[in-house]
Image (cartoon, rainbow, N blue to C red):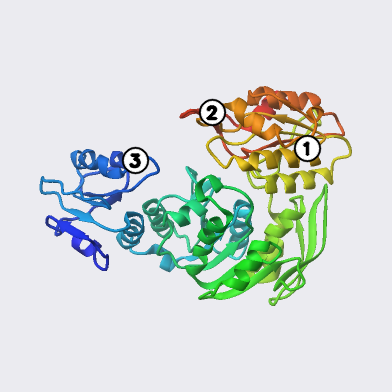
Amino acid sequence: MTLRELLNGIEVQEITGDTSCEITGIAYNSRRITPGALFVALHGENTDGAVFVEDAIRRGAAAVLSQSPCATGNGVPCIQVDNARKVLAKLSGAFYNHPAERLCSVGITGTNGKTTVSFMLREIFKAAGKHPGLIGTVRYEIGDRVVPAARTTPESPDIQAMLAQMERSGCDSVIMEVSSHALDQYRVYGILYDAAVFTNLTQDHLDYHGTFEEYFAVKTRLFRQVSRFAVINRDDSWGRRLLTESRFIAGCVSYGFDEGADVRGQDPVTDTLGSRMRVESPWGAAEISLQLIGRFNLHNALAAFATAAALGIPVDTIAKALAEMENVPGRLEAIPNKKGKRVFVDYAHTDDALLHVLEALRAITPGKLIVVFGCGGNRDTDKRRLMGQVAARLADYSIITNDNPRNETPENIAADIAAGFDSERKYEVVLDRRAAILRGLELTGKKDVLLVAGKGHETYQEFAGTIVPFDDREIVREAL
């Protein structure tokens, strides 16, 4: 494809150089340039990608696109645009021949629940005879290939490349977690989803978005990119606002335990065996049983049920798939052991997520409920105290430790969390995460439950730009 063909329909501010050159790829990182590729210089949080133009050209870039003036002076064509991220998404779709148009696509957004809903839909789609791909926080699934996820929603060229690979691998559908950062940075711009799901909105990422209003506004962008069904949590206050304020180009399906929900859960029960409820919907009723514990997982199941049923999958197929589904990696994942200790690892890293997980575990804990957790550095600082308050209220004892401190001082993060506790007798601080987990195991008796929260499926810790291998689940297994 020539640069001229690729730029067809793109609004540009200025073009210098010959646009008849062939483009063999698209890259936004100069280190990933291959000969013939188009280099798109993005504005990052700290650096303008335009400073890497010369490096990209040395590596063989055939053309450069940027928001900044970027005349190369050496014959390499340069295109200046108003919004490089938006244009990057358009160009990526065109370069890979818009694979999303030929896949049944579901986008899932919300603060909590995205990963579990995506895994539920993956199982339901497979039970219905479909061949889904998966893009999300835990991993990317492309046909038979499984790739560890670098981020929840990749940059637009990576997404389009994966969608094209899914199509070539025989996938007929894709289930995608869509983060607020991805929506704000136009990573999924131009994709028209068959269905989009809103799970909930609770405090997170305010270090990036600034306010809840902006966080909500960014999330709502997804629902302008839906062709068939918007699936909204009616039990969530922001979901109800989305239902009343938005004009969807698609049909709308609400879910929840609220009487007005289109897909309504009734008579919820959760215990050590799992969770159960009856579901009433426009597509029929069903008895839903999960191996997963917690009322919040019933909410996740309602989201998956509503989406799958709206897309035409029979309710009995949905119910069977949900009943057979096992734990999602790092989501209230029980760690079996010969010592008989009841230990769970969960990704909960917001106050709302921690609240729901602790409530679920409290219901099955005859003895003490102990939690080991921390908060990430260089992220929303306000939620630290809130997470401390939740732990103080719902756990019998807490061990505050490191999560991913990044460039912050671990002692300061721990102090912010401790500010949420009303008594020093309810917690201790052990900054070494391995030592904190071992301390939690030491305190956990036969009737007790230990929750290790915050990292879930993650296999690393981040300290001042250094990535250190670390997996909560492996630490627990080794210790026991």
Q: Which mark is residue 47?
A: 3
Quick one: label 2 or label 3, which is nearer the N terminus?
A: 3
Mark 2 Cα-neighbour bin, 10 Å: few <14, some 14–19, many ≥20: few
User: Quarter of the image holding residue 323?
Assistant: bottom right
Residue type marked 1: Ala
Which marked residue is nearer to the observer: mark 2 or mark 3? 3
69 left or right of 453?
A: left
Q: Residue placed at 57% from the left, 70% from the top?
A: 230
Residue at numbered disc 1: 392
Residue type marked 2: Pro
Badge 3 element: loop
* 422 relative to 10, above or below: above
- Residue placed most toward the observer, 16 or 1: 16
Badge 2 element: strand
271 left or right of 233?
A: right
Residue at numbered disc 2: 469
User: Quarter of the image holding residue 46?
Assistant: top left
Spot occupied by residue 318 in the image (x, y as percentages of width and height):
67, 65
Q: Which mark is residue 302?
A: none
